[in-house]
Image (cartoon, coloured by chain):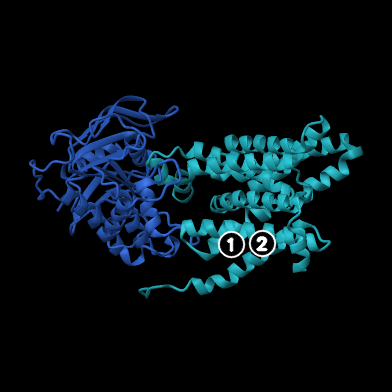
Chain colours: A blue, B cyan
Amino acid sequence: MSGNGRSRDPGESVAALPADQPAICFDRATLAYGDRVVWSELSMTVPRGEFLAVLGPNGSGKTSLLRALLGLAPLASGTLEVLGASPRRGNPAIGYVPQHAGFDRDVPLRGRDLVGLGVDGHRWGFGRLSREDRLRVAKALEAVAAGPYANEPIGRLSGGEQQRLRIAQALVGNPDLLLCDEPLASLDMRYQQEITELIGGWARERHGTVVFVTHDVNPVLGYARRVVFVVNGRWAAGPTDEVLTSERMSGLYDAPVEVLRVRGRIVVVGEASGAGFDIDEPHHFPAPVGAPQ
Amino acid sequence: MIDQLLHLLPYAFVQDMLLAGVLVSIVAGLVSRFVVARNMSFAVHALAEVGFTGSAGFILIGLSPVLGLLTGSLVTAFFIGTLGLRIRERDAVVGVVMAFGLGLGVLFITLNAQFATEAFSILLFGAISTVSQGDLILLAAMAALTLAGLGVMYRPLTFATVDPVVAEARGVPVRLVSILFLLMLAAAVAEAVQVVGVLLILTLLITPGATAERLTAQPGLATAVSVGVALLATLGGILLALVTAVPVSFYVTTIAFVCYLAARLGAPVLDRPRRPRPT
C-alpha cells in the first residue's frame, strides 16, 4: 500500500558518483529566517533512487526545505550534502518542478520554449539552441507526450498540459535529483495521477531521486517509500509506514492524533485546534475525510 | 508627396534624422518586449518624467540636457530597483519616486524661467529634427551599450521574466537581472526621448511589444515584430513630418497606435486553435 513492495536494485547506479553515496544528507540542520526557526536539528539521509514525500501543513517549511537543497536558503547550523557536495545555486544535476500557478493567457511563450529555457535559460548571452539541444528538447517533450501542443501558446493550455511541460523542462537537463514543490496543487484527480506517474516512472527507469512536496500524501502513496513530516519546527522522518502512525503523529503534533487507513488512503484525524494549529483545515495535511467516530 | 520626399532624402540632416530613428527604434523595439512582459509600463513613465527633471537640473547648472536626462532616469532606475524588489510593492515605489522627482522638476523649472520654454518643449515633445552629429554619436554609443547589455543578459532575462521561480532554482540571479534591466531601460528611455519626447515615451517603449505579443507566441518572432513596429512608426513618422507641418511625435504615436489596433483586431484570426481541443 505504501510502496514497500518496490525493492531497490543496488546494482543500478547513476552518473559518476558511487551507488552508496546518498543523494541527500541532512545532519542536525537548522533553517531560520532571522529569529524565526523553520525547522531545527533535522537529520535525515535519502539514498539514491529514493522517492521522498515531504509532508506537513502550509507554512511548516516544506518549500524552505527545497530552497535549502537548491542552495537558495543557507542553513543557520548543521550540514547538508546534496549529491555528495554542499548545496549550490544552479546545480545542473538538480531538476525543479514548481507549484502549478498557471501561465498568463498572453505570455509570449510556447511549450517548446519553456523546455528550451530548461536547457540554456540560465546561460548568459544571446545564443540559439544547438541542433543537439533542440533534439534533447524534442525528446523531453516526447517523454511527457507533450508533442501535440508543444508549439501552442503556453497560456492557452490546460493545467495538466502545462504541468507536463514543467516536468519536461525539469528533466531535459538529465538530472540525478528531481525536486517537486506541490506539483499536483490545483490539478484534478486524473491529472494528479498522470503527473505522479510521470515523475514516479522517471525515478524508476532512471534510478533518479525524487523529493516531492505535497500537502496530501495519498496521490504518492504508491511511490513514496519514505516521508519527512514537518510541523511547528519539528519533524519526523523515516519509512512511510513508520512515520504515518497515530503514535508518531501524536508526538509530533503534541496532541492526540489518529492515523487511519481507509480503502488504501491515509487519513489523519485530530482535535488539535487548541494547540495553535488545525490539522482539520482543508488545505492542510491531510485532506480531511469523514472519519468514523 | 513622394517626389518631395525623394527630393529631401539626399540631405544630410534628413539622413541623420533617419539614422537616429533607426538606432532608437531597434533599442526601443527590443526593450519594449520585456517592458510589456514584465508589466513595467508605469516604470517607463516614471523614468521619463524624472529624466525630464534631470535635464532641467543639468540645464540649470549649464550641462548637457541629454546627459541630465540619462542621469535622471538612471538614478530613478536605481531607486526603483533597490526599493521595489517585491512585485507587490513595486507600483507604489515607482509612484513615490516619480512624485518626488516631479517635485524637484518643478523647482528646477522655476529657477530656470528665462530660457526654459524652448528647451522644455523639445524635451517634452521630442526633437529629432534638431539632431546634431554630436547627438548622433552619443545616441549610437548609448544604443551600442544597451544592445550589448541586452545581448549579454538576453537568455537569463527571458527566463526570469516568463518563469521567475524556476529561473531562480536554476541559478539565475533574478534580483541582479531585474536591476540590470531597469538600468538598461533607463538608457533606452533617455534615447527614445530624443524622438518622441518625455510625454510620448510610452509609444516607443510599450506599444511595439504590446503589438507583438498579440500576434505571436514565438519569442524570436515576437521580438522581430516589435522592432519592426518601432521602425515603422519612427521612420514613417519622420518622413511624414518632413512633408507636412505636423510634428514627428504625432505621426509616431498614430502609426504605433494603428499597428496595435490592427493587431488587436487581427489577432482573433491568428488565434484559431490549430488542433482539435478535447471538450
Whether residue A261 is visible here, answered yes or no, is yes
Relative image position of residue B162 (x, y in whole percent): 46, 51
Crowding near pointer 1: few (<14 within 10 Å), some, many (20+)?
many
Q: Quadrant of residue B117?
A: top right
x 53%, y 65%: residue: B215
Q: Residue at x 43, y 40 (%)?
A: A124
| Residue B219 image point, x, y percent | 47, 56
What residue is disc 1 on? Answer: B211
Chain under numbered label 2: B
Indicate whether A180 appears above or below B9.
above
Identified by mark 1, the residue type is Thr
Q: Is residue B100 above or below residue B277?
A: above
Q: Residue at x 47, y 48 (%)?
A: B158
Instruction: Please give the name of the residue rendered at 78% of the width and 31% of the height, measured from the top-left corner.
Output: B63
Q: Secondary structure at mark 1?
A: helix
Amino acid type at mark 2: Ala
* Image position of A267 with respect to B71: above or below: below
Say if residue B99 shows up in the picture.
no
The part of the image, by quadrant, that contains residue B260 is bottom right
Q: Residues within 10 Å of mark 2 (few under 14, many from 20)?
A: many
Instruction: Using the image, name the chain to which the residue with label 1 belongs.
Output: B
* Nearer to us in this view, B150 or A236: B150
Count every numbered label the image shows and give the total: 2
